[in-house]
Amino acid sequence: MQDRPAPEQVVPAADLTEAQVQFFQKNGYLQVDRITTDAEVEWLRGVYDRLFAARAGEAEGRYFDLGGPRGHTGREGLPQILAPERAAPELCDTLVYRNARRLAARLLRCPEDTVTGGGHMILKPARYGQETPWHQDEAYWSPDVVLERVSVWVPLDPATVESGCMQFIPGSHHTEIRTHRHIGNNPLIHGLVTDDVDPAHAVACPIPAGGATCHHPRTLHYSGPNVTGHCRRAYVLVLGAPPKPRDVPARRPWLDEERRALQARSGQDGAA
Ligand code: NI
């Protein structure tokens, strides 16, 4: 694998204008053409491919198919790695990480040194990579805390409508958390979907490798199946303020369904 490029050698603009910050506040998303260099994208692809080949963190539940029942089938349609920085801490010492923190600080109007959080990686394999159906990210999060965060979604391959670029419903972050359900109504599938979204209102954001889209945790978003002959690798950094406890937990029954389904399955495994 090639050496990691020194991040201090190059500083592409991740500083946002006031107009960009206001666009984000109004619409709940923002497109940034470039937050890292071609050399770092190439290096990140090497790290990414190594982590997916190893199914890093699978034993701890951090590698699984977001779009299918848990368990390695050899044909995961939407494989995901949570907290890849645990297996590859060098990811935190990159231009992409530093610029994502800077973007989050600007968008949340908070000091950069208070920004915390981590990442996940979602792969859409060539030809059979599944769609990521309409959802709000906050629906996945613990009902016990409030998180003021921004997701910075960075593709390592060109993200087009055909390969699965992000699509957003502008202004949807001003709404509450909708009712979500598990893909296929199967609570063993981690992926969530919310119904009754009108895709006629969606804005697709094709961006080059090394660009970014940022979104608010309540912004409705979607990405289509990958119908191209190339995989679509994405590294997502979810960054912002430390979690604050909620006085009253939010109501997210889909999380309870998943927990119960996993407990029931592990009970069966134990009995077998
Ligand atoms: Ni999402």
Image (tube, rainbow, N blue to C red):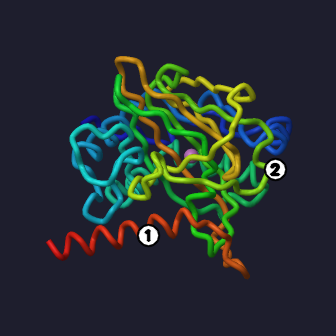
Q: On screen, 179 above or below 164?
A: below
The residue at the point 39 percent across, 38 percent down is 123
Front residue (pair 139, 95): 139
Q: Which mark, by number, is residue 211?
A: none
Q: Disc 2 marks which amino acid?
A: His
> Farthest residue in the left direction?
272
Query: Residue 174: percent from the left, percent from the top?
Result: 81, 50
Which of the two labelled residues, at mark 1 and mark 2, occupies the earlier sequence position? 2
Q: Residue 245: which quarter of the image?
A: bottom right
Front residue (pair 235, 180): 180
Q: Residues within 10 Å of mark 1 (few under 14, many from 20)?
A: some
Q: Which mark, by number, is residue 259?
A: 1
- Is the residue marked 1 within 8 Å of ligand 1, measured from its CB? no
Q: Which mark, by number, is residue 174?
A: 2
Label 1: which secondary element:
helix
Q: On screen, 157 above or below 148?
A: above
